[in-house]
Image: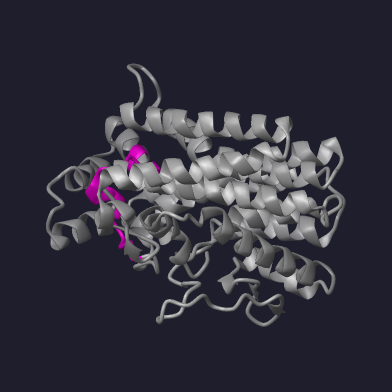
Amino acid sequence: MTDSSHSSWTSAGHPRPIVDEMDTSTGVIATGLRLPAGFALIAEDPQLGPAVSTCLAKVEKQLREAIANSDPLADATSRHLVEAGGKRIRPLLTILASHLGNATRPEVVVAAVVVELTHLATLYHDDVMDSAPYRRGAPTAHEVWGNSVAILTGDLIFARASILVSELGSRALGIQARTFERLCLGQLHETVGPQDGEDPVAHYLSVIADKTGSLVAASGQLGAIFADAPASAVDVMVSYGEKVGVAFQLADDVIDVTGLKVKSGKSPGTDLREGVPTLPVLLLRQAATSGDESAVRVLALVDGDLTSDEALAEAVSALREHPATQEAWAVAQQWADDAVAALDPLPDTTVKQALASFAQAVVSRDV
């Protein structure tokens, strides 16, 4: 969706300049982040484009200020993922949602920084739990400094997010707390797996709603709230954000077996090799249990020893060709369609069009 290999720092270690403008030919705005196709149409609006660009530039500046630390080690570990670049999708949603009301309020920028800090904090923890070697094209923090330092860095970044959100008032603090609770529960439920008799697919959808959907929903919710948007618009952003978050993760699942090597350094089949229960595999298991002999054969490859690149490639190829993968695409598309439908109560504006296009873009991307 974005050029996740992009770094906001030069090879000499100096910050790249932040530009307060949008290139209408590429959809690149503010920090050099390349927008999904759905958001590139923001550039066509002479008022919305510059407004979003300026706000994103402020977010990037305040994000770096928020993670700065006088302790050299804490400063280096906290900057690790920020300097590796990123999509900034959550703060972008916060900013777009603010255009449903008064987008000039300074609290909008603070809220956007809060959701990105929260996201960054979870990445440090996720990478430790998943033993992931790379994130955004760079070695993960635990590979550089060890598990304990990586976990503590995630805690430190979340603490910074909590300080900022406390300045926004009790309502924002409540949203942040409930969102973090869902993030933790999602990770817990993913770790222990479905209970006896529980549908594995339903369990998985619940997990990603908590791990991904909850924070995307909070991003739009906070943007609308601090722009004094109507209560109905706030509700729309909550519903839309949750559905988009789930669609995004489901698309990632399918891309793991259909995509080319992505710019973050993650190769096809990474989830298979790590034993991550993604939707294509869960649907494959369902088919095998129902007596689909082709699914049984593919499952034997998926559950086999995937240590060698050859074995992994064979398993990926077999899963890619099985109908379970296409079925997973259809499920992701349905979540995206439901997200678009959630926007119906909003007036027809460029913001609504951008949100609708983005919901579709998350399931039509290649990486």
Q: What stretch is highlighted in magenta?
A: 265-282
Say whether residue 296 is left or right of residue 203. Answer: left
Q: Residue 313 or 113: which is nearer the viewer? A: 113
Asked if one can make out residue 334 in the rendered structure from this viewpoint, the answer is no
Quarter holding residue 311: bottom left
Question: What residue appears at the point 43 percent right and 57 percent down from the top-left corner?
Answer: 75
Q: Could you say where residue 364 lies in the image, as x and y percent from the top left?
A: 54, 61
Q: Could you say where residue 19 lies in the image, as x and y percent from the top left?
A: 66, 77
Q: Could you say where residue 90 lies in the image, as x and y percent from the top left?
A: 60, 52
Q: Residue furthest front?
A: 70
Question: What residue appears at the point 65 percent right and 40 percent down from the top-left corner?
Answer: 165
Q: In which quarter of the image is the C terminus?
A: bottom left
Is 16 situated above or below 330?
Answer: below
Q: Could you say where residue 163 lies in the image, as x and y percent from the top left?
A: 60, 40
- Count of number-bearing discs: 0
Q: Residue 227 or 205: which is nearer the viewer? A: 227
Q: Does the magenta stretch include residue 80?
A: no
Q: Is residue 271 magenta?
A: yes
